[in-house]
Amino acid sequence: MASLKRRSGLGRVGFWALLIFILLIFMSPFLWMLLNSLKTPIQIITLPPSFWFKPTLSNYSNVFEQQEFGKFFINSLAIGVGSTFFGLLLGLPAAYAIARYNQGRLATLILLARMIPGISLLIPWFIMFRALHLTDTYLALILTHMLVGVPFIVWVMIPFFEAIPKELDEAGRVDGGSTLQVFLHVILPISGPGIVTASIMAFIYSWNNFMFSVVLAANNTKTLPVAIYNFISYAQIDWGGLMAAAVVITLPVLIIAILTQRFIVAGLTAGAVKG
């Protein structure tokens, strides 16, 4: 008995040690970035690197006061929320229709739209938005981000809706509800984990997107991934400001992922079980 308890205790210690080791490996880039964001330029380039130093917030002061990162943060937030909201507005009904009416070809077509390299669409998008005088606007960036967000939302939600028994739809119609009413008042309220998962993933994609923003955005709608280039010049690189800016970009997404991880796991696994 004592031997079994000892083995169980050693196994638990080994499990946590392995978990911490893996966590350190995956978190080490962010921790390194965070440490460098608190160093002076001299401390950053010093070899070997020092882990004991007097931290400074001058890099963050530079980010928000001189580089107007507050404005870029608002731009990224507005575009991310807008593309996610309108993506859900289109993607949820589409996923429900595909799941309930077995529209496999339509689902494949939407998947193909997701698989097309975004860079191949940049020139057509730019020409079209320039003709419509929509370059450097939130609308242009929201629409381009939806190009990836909507297919992702659809493909996350299709198996989730398929896992919901069709008897619930039939019961709603027996009670006098239309298809739209059943969808809004019966299906959506029990689809919370899937909707949260799709929303978070679509928002993270929009938040991190660089390619569309660097072509279609300018001073008014510049987003954080594009604004980070302000710290890179021909003559030098402001490593302290660059690290601080990278922390500003990464931290909100990291916090969202940590706070909503249980919803993400529930949403991704709920659609895997039918019935």
Image (cartoon, helix red, strand yellow):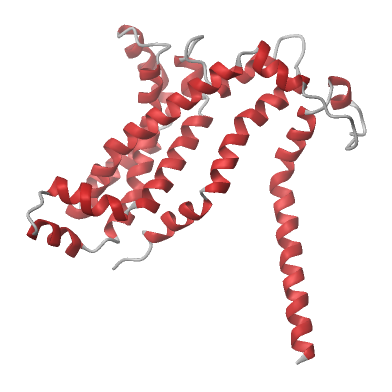
Residue at 44 percent across and 58 percent down: it is 266
Residue 83 vertical placement versus 125 (above, below): below
Mark count: 0
Residue 27 vertical placement versus 87 (above, below): below
Q: Looking at the image, can residue 273 be seen?
A: yes
Left of 88 or right of it: where is 145? right
Left of 71 or right of it: where is 131? left
Q: Looking at the image, can residue 103 be seen?
A: no
Residue at 73 percent across and 57 percent down: it is 20
Residue 188 vertical placement versus 87 (above, below): below
Place of residue 191 in the rendered image (x, y in percent of width and height, measured from the top left): 32, 53
Place of residue 65 in the rendered image (x, y in percent of width and height, measured from the top left): 67, 13
Q: Nearer the viewer, residue 114 or 154?
A: 154
Quarter of the image for residue 17 reads bottom right
Place of residue 143 in the rendered image (x, y in percent of width and height, measured from the top left): 35, 24
Residue 111 vertical placement versus 136 (above, below): below
Q: Quadrant of the N terminus?
A: bottom right
Quarter of the image for residue 233 reads top right
